[in-house]
Image: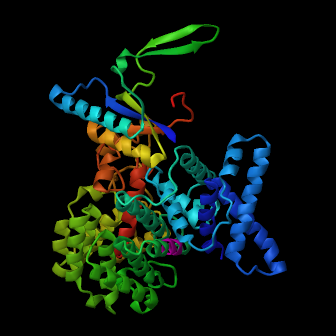
Amino acid sequence: MFRKEYGRAVAVLTRVFRDLDLAEDAVQEAFAIAVQRWPVDGPPPSPAGWILTTARNRGIDRLRREAARQDKHAQAALLAVPDEQPEEGPVEDERLRLLFTCCHPALAPQAQVALTLRLLGGLSTTEIARAFLVPEATMAQRLVRAKSKIRHARIPYRVPEEADLPERLAGVLAVIYLVFNAGYVATAGDRLVREDLCLEAIRLARLVCRLMPDEPEAQGLLALLLLTQSRRPARTAADGSLVLLPDQDRGRWDRELVAEGQELVRACLRRNTPGPYQLQAAIAAVHSDVRTSEETDWRQIVALYDALLAMAPSPVVALNRAVAVAEVAGPEAALALLDDRALLGYQPFHGVRADLLRRAGRSAEARAAYEAALALTDNAVERAFLLGRLSELGREGPLIKPSRPRLRTARGAQKGKVRPCPRSDGWTRRASCVRRSRASPGTSCRGARRTGARRCPAPHGCRPARRSCRSGRARSAHRSERRELQW
Amino acid sequence: MTQYLISLYQPDGVVPPPEFLEPVMQKLGGLQEEMTSAGAWVFSGGLHQPDTATVVRPQEGGAALLTDGPYVEAKEHVGGFWVVRADDLDGGLRWARKVSDITGLPVEIRPFAFSTLP
């Protein structure tokens, strides 16, 4: 009840009060009262309507109090409140308005995600902070700042006009995708999946689909999320360890989600206006078509990746395509495609390369690649998996310490500037690392942004690209594409 | 209606050749007319190079301290600006995009907290 009605109520009251903070506070108060009263008096005939009315009254009370204290802003706001009771009926477009406000491109991507989860998902600041591994105070500040920008810069509370819609909708879908990814592969922690975030993303994707049924990419995104989510039960073994796509017990895939996702993909195919999300969903649908991984129609998957690459070219998509090519033409053919230096800082690149080298029988090179992959993840489940593969290769353990490489070259140490090496294989690239330790931080993330790599590809690069706003989005996008990498 | 400051950031000391500059100035003139006829234009202006700037700092108990050059040492400085009025940020962004498209330079848009111009 809370999750479902919270976003609705905030959306409607934002319309009434034209103030996010006031709307949010009022709705929270109304829910607090409901928690006290309903168990005693029994729930009202229309709980949603009750929440709206109560929240509206609370909000007006607060405005009256503030107006009485000669607060001009409150006096003006009070006059602007419409007389009629907020309606309970056509509120869905209110939520859509709120979603477009939360995902406005003038807000930083992290702020967009946080606001969406807070205002439409009803997640608490604490929950959001925990999900994104930042201190609660940081997250609270991020939310306050975003709301203040919405108020002062007058970020509009409406669905964009037709001309701007495709671009703006893409932003909304990207935020939903980010929420899902943040849940699907947590970068740190002991568990691989944060279920609540995945479910919230699916809920939001459903909402967008319902509100904008004519947007094929919205349907594509929902299908992609459903098909990905369907594999979740099979993705970890009983002991919590990672199971790759070829080894997954497909009997444990959630058939209901598969069926729903496939139906959406079929609808997209009929419509025949392909887009990146639809194509990714189609790839996932091909995987879900068969009962064992041996039956997978890899040729079709390669063809879909070709289409995806033509539409949204990125090194990560090219990498995923190479994985499919390996199934059609063998590991050596795929290895020949993996020459993109832009991906040196991208953990799955090394994982894929290691796997291909292992299958091609090039053990020594495979070992080095697994070690490079290990150096780039902090997730306990992923680390355990990589260490397992390494030991299968006939070594007792990794050559390097299983932690992020930190460079202590003579020159770097002298200057007291010891930072994590930006190169995935920083262990061997001392020269560039020394240069990096002298480079001013945060200056040239453009390279990373352009190439889609997690870290700057430049030898004298910059901070990890995760620091810069745009790449925050890019990075998480890669993370999700890992799914297709069978990670 | 909110007023927004749209500032154009130019690289210091780089003066493009006239064959590039002229069409840009012409298009900016067209934009000015467009803003005026849409009722969005409030004020606009272009600045000389930042090395013509002087910074004035208050001194405790004495005359202000003057220093030669711009306040912030950077490779780019505000070279021109527009003050526009719009219903909301999307309206302001539409003008900011146009300025950026015409000049090929980054622009910043920022809302006024108050303004003495109507």
**x, y percent for residue A268:** 31, 79
Tell me the residue at 50%/57% (across/down): A101
**x, y percent for residue A108:** 47, 51
Tell me the residue at 20%/77% (across/down): A303
Residue farthest right in this picture: A40
Judge whether residue A374 can be spotted in this image.
Answer: no
Report if residue A16 lies within the magenta region: no
Left or right of residue A230: residue A299: left
**x, y percent for residue A114:** 54, 59
Q: Is residue B32 above or below residue A376?
A: above
Image quadrant of residue A218?
Answer: bottom left
Tell me the residue at 18%/31% (across/down): B20
Image quadrant of residue A287?
Answer: bottom left
Q: Which residues are magenta?
A: A198-204
Decide which of A404, A143 is in the foreground and name it.
A143
**x, y percent for residue A405:** 41, 54
